[in-house]
């Protein structure tokens, strides 16, 4: 039975806004495994540990820092979540979706998520960026099941353009400008935590998947349920099983994330400038 209830989330949003003025929130950013996000030109004004916000146990995970940073630039605000929750850690779908829902309650109109993924296309080398245009939910659950589906309408949100076409076009343009090899594709979301078998990768590839990962899908559904614009940037950290020539490891994921942080910071800065400009029109 789900114990994380809407009133817990609403209390967390009120507490964060009361202690740390967030300004006019322009976006929420989420860092994936081994990925460090910064906001060039913005000032970090607060760093809040997740245990101060969420009533459930926070399970440590290498490559994730369980804090949310508040960044300011004048009257504009930005929320950077320095780690996410995964179903394979034992969290419920509602707990996994707590991050976008908290961001939505604090007024974020856009949800920009990064993740580390395995590339199922051999033409996508490690270190490349894949701008997600759609997903396949193979995680066996949905954050709108139960009480959370009754929290706010609609119960049946349309997912046709879950990944904002305008933000995707901007990401493709700016990713090339900062030096990424960039692709567009479909994110196959699986449960984990074991890496996929070669047969599973072949199935996912035939189903239309481009990259595979163990996160993000629940967040996207929750963000779209609240009407937020969504952009997901998948850092291809390794070839998927059957594509890779050797065994897969989480350490490899962290290494590629570390190497890409400079280009990611530059890309995020450009995207934020566009979002702020749009918000002021």
Image (spheres, rainbow, N blue to C red):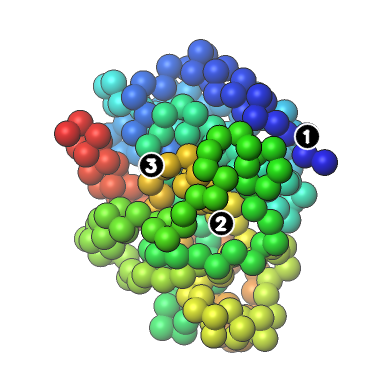
In the structure shown, which secondary structural element does the residue marked by tag 3 occupy?
Answer: strand
- N-terminal label among 2 and 1: 1
Residue depicted at x 43% and y 56%: 162
Residue named by callout 2: 217
Spatial CA distance of label 2 from label 3 is 16 Å
Report x, y in % for residue 123: 41, 83
Q: Is residue 21 above or below residue 94?
A: above
Please report the residue visible at 62 percent of the width from the left and 20 percent of the height from the top.
11
The single residue placed furthest to the top in the displayed view is: 18
Query: Which label was assigned to residue 110?
Result: 3
Measure how far apart labels 2 and 1 are at the Cα level.
21 Å
Element carrying mark 1: loop
Q: Residues within 10 Å of mark 1 (few under 14, many from 20)?
A: few
User: Residue at point 69% right, 56% down?
Assistant: 141
Q: How many badges with numbers are in the image?
A: 3
Q: CA distance from mark 1 to mark 3?
A: 28 Å
In the displayed structure image, the side of residue 252 where residue 162 appears, left or right: left
Q: Nearer the viewer, residue 266 or 9?
A: 9
Q: Name, please, the residue furthest toward the right.
A: 1
The percent position of residue 234, horizontal first and vertical second, equals 46, 62
Q: Residues within 10 Å of mark 3 (few under 14, many from 20)?
A: many
* Image spot of residue 220 (x, y percent): 51, 51
């Amino acid at each position: 039975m789900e114990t994380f209830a809407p009133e817990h989330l609403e209390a967390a949003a009120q507490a964060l806004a009361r202690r740390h003025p967030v300004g006019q929130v322009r976006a929420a950013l989420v860092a994936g495994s081994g990925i460090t996000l910064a906001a060039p030109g913005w000032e970090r004004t607060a760093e809040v540990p997740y245990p101060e916000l969420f009533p459930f146990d926070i399970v440590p995970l290498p490559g994730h820092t369980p804090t949310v940073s508040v960044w300011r630039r004048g009257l504009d605000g930005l929320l950077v979540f320095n780690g996410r929750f995964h179903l394979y850690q034992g969290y419920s779908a509602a707990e996994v979706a707590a991050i976008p829902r908290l961001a939505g309650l604090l007024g974020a109109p856009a949800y920009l998520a990064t993740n580390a993924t395995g590339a199922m296309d051999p033409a996508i080398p490690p270190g490349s960026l894949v701008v997600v245009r759609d997903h396949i939910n193979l995680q066996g659950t949905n954050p709108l099941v139960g009480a959370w589906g009754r929290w706010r309408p609609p119960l049946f949100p349309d997912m046709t353009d879950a990944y904002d076409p305008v933000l995707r076009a901007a990401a493709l343009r700016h990713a090339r400008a900062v030096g990424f090899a960039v692709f567009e594709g479909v994110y196959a979301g699986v449960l984990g935590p074991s890496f996929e078998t070669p047969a599973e990768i072949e199935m996912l590839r035939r189903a239309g998947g481009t990259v595979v990962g163990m996160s993000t899908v629940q967040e996207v559904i929750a963000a779209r349920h609240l009407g937020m614009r969504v952009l997901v940037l998948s850092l291809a950290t390794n070839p998927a099983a059957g594509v890779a020539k050797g065994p897969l490891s989480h350490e490899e994921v962290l290494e590629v994330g570390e190497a890409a942080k400079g280009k990611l910071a530059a890309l995020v800065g450009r995207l934020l400038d566009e979002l702020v400009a749009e918000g002021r029109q």
